[in-house]
């Protein structure tokens, strides 16, 4: 029987891993055409608005600008997906329970071949795959999977020598100025590659970080003092950036107090 020709799209923010995955696909499924390799959610969104959906997705779970699951919330995707992940056993268990294919990095050729084969079966039998993905999203967003965290663990920052990762728990605040900056508890300030504070906020644990205003997202651990003003606004003084004062509007003051007094 003749093998059906399929088009696939890879979403992977590590260039070397994306290249290796593309090579492995060629080895295990020579008939599978790689229509595009997309490095971020932003690029994937733009691609989806300009192109028809492929027959198959190969998606990294954690991208530099968010989790790939966001695409299912924003677009009506119906093609089967093979997720690639370096997550722990709890997340892997969530994939398995929900019947969604996953590849644990580093990716092995035989596992990739099995995953592609399963996707062929899904396409040929026209199974209702999107419903399975919705179940996966629910479980990985905290509805019964206590072992999974969807918040960003590290940020890639720019330095004079290139870039380096900074653990999220080392971050005191995020600032919007002419560019977007990350401030650490050590007093360092680094440039980030983001286009809005909303993008950054979506990646953070709301139990630890608070969107104080349009310019600042602050860590609860960076707060030194909170001072009320006569107009019901608040002034928050941070430990880092050293003694920086951040205004909390009258409208947000009550919510901020509740957040701080959890």
Image (tube, rainbow, N blue to C red):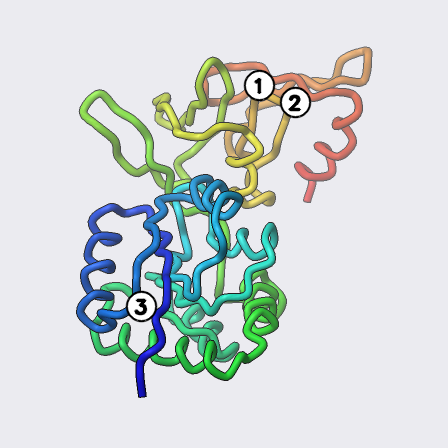
**Residues under numbered marks 1 and 3 in contact, where contact means CB atoms less than 8 Å apart:** no
- Residue 51, relative to residue 157: is it above or below? below
As rendered, which of 101 and 75 lies closer to the eye? 75
Q: Quadrant of residue 155?
A: top left
Q: Which residue is mark 2?
A: 226
- Residue 79, relative to residue 222: is it above or below? below
**Residues under numbered marks 1 and 2 in contact, where contact means CB atoms less than 8 Å apart:** yes
Tell me which residue sits at (44%, 70%) in the image: 90
Taking the view exactly as shown, the residue that stands out farthest to the front is: 2
C-alpha gap between disc 1 and disc 3? 43 Å
> Alpha-carbon neighbours of circle 3 within 10 Å: few (<14), some, or many (≥20)?
some
Tell me which residue sits at (62%, 31%) in the image: 211
> Alpha-carbon neighbours of circle 1 within 10 Å: few (<14), some, or many (≥20)?
some
Tell me which residue sits at (57%, 19%) in the image: 237
Earlier in the chain: of badge 3 and badge 2, it is: 3
User: Which secondary structure lies at badge 2?
Assistant: strand
Q: Which residue is mark 1?
A: 237
Residue 130 at x, y = what percent? Answer: 58, 69
User: Which secondary structure lies at badge 1?
Assistant: strand
- Quadrant containing the C terminus in the rendered view: top right
Earlier in the chain: of badge 1 and badge 2, it is: 2
C-alpha gap between disc 3 and disc 2? 45 Å
C-alpha gap between disc 1 and disc 2? 6 Å
> Alpha-carbon neighbours of circle 2 within 10 Å: few (<14), some, or many (≥20)?
some
Select label 1 or label 3 by which is in front: 3
Tell me which residue sits at (76%, 17%) in the image: 233
Image disc number at residue 145: none
Q: Relative to residue 37, is residue 216 drawn left or right? A: right
Q: Which residue is mark 3?
A: 104
- Quadrant containing the N terminus in the rendered view: bottom left
Taking the view exactly as shown, the residue that stands out farthest to the top is: 230
Q: Quadrant of residue 138?
A: bottom right
């Amino acid at each position: 029987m003749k093998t059906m020709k399929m088009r696939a799209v890879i979403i992977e923010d590590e260039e070397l891993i994306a290249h290796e995955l593309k090579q492995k696909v060629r080895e295990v499924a020579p008939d599978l055409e790689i229509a595009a390799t997309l490095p971020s959610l932003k690029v994937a969104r733009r691609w989806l608005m300009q192109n028809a959906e492929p027959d198959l997705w190969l998606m990294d779970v954690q991208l530099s600008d968010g989790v790939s699951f966001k695409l299912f919330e924003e677009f009506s995707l119906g093609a089967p997906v093979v997720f690639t992940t370096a997550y722990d056993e709890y997340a892997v268990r969530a994939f398995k329970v929900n019947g969604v294919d996953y590849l644990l990095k580093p990716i092995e050729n035989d596992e990739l071949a099995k995953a592609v084969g399963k996707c062929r079966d899904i396409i040929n039998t026209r199974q209702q795959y999107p419903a399975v993905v919705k179940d996966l999203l629910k479980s990985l967003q905290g509805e019964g999977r206590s072992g999974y965290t969807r918040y960003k663990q590290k940020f890639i920052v720019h330095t004079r020598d290139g870039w380096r990762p900074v653990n999220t728990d080392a971050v005191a605040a995020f600032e919007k100025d002419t560019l977007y900056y990350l401030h650490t508890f050590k007093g360092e300030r680094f440039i980030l590659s983001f286009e809005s504070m909303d993008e950054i906020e979506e990646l953070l644990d709301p139990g630890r970080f608070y969107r104080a205003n349009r310019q600042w997202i602050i860590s609860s651990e960076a707060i030194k003092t909170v001072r009320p003003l006569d107009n019901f606004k608040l002034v928050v003084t941070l430990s880092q950036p050293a003694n920086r004062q951040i205004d909390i509007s009258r409208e947000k003051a009550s919510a901020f107090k509740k957040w701080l007094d959890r």
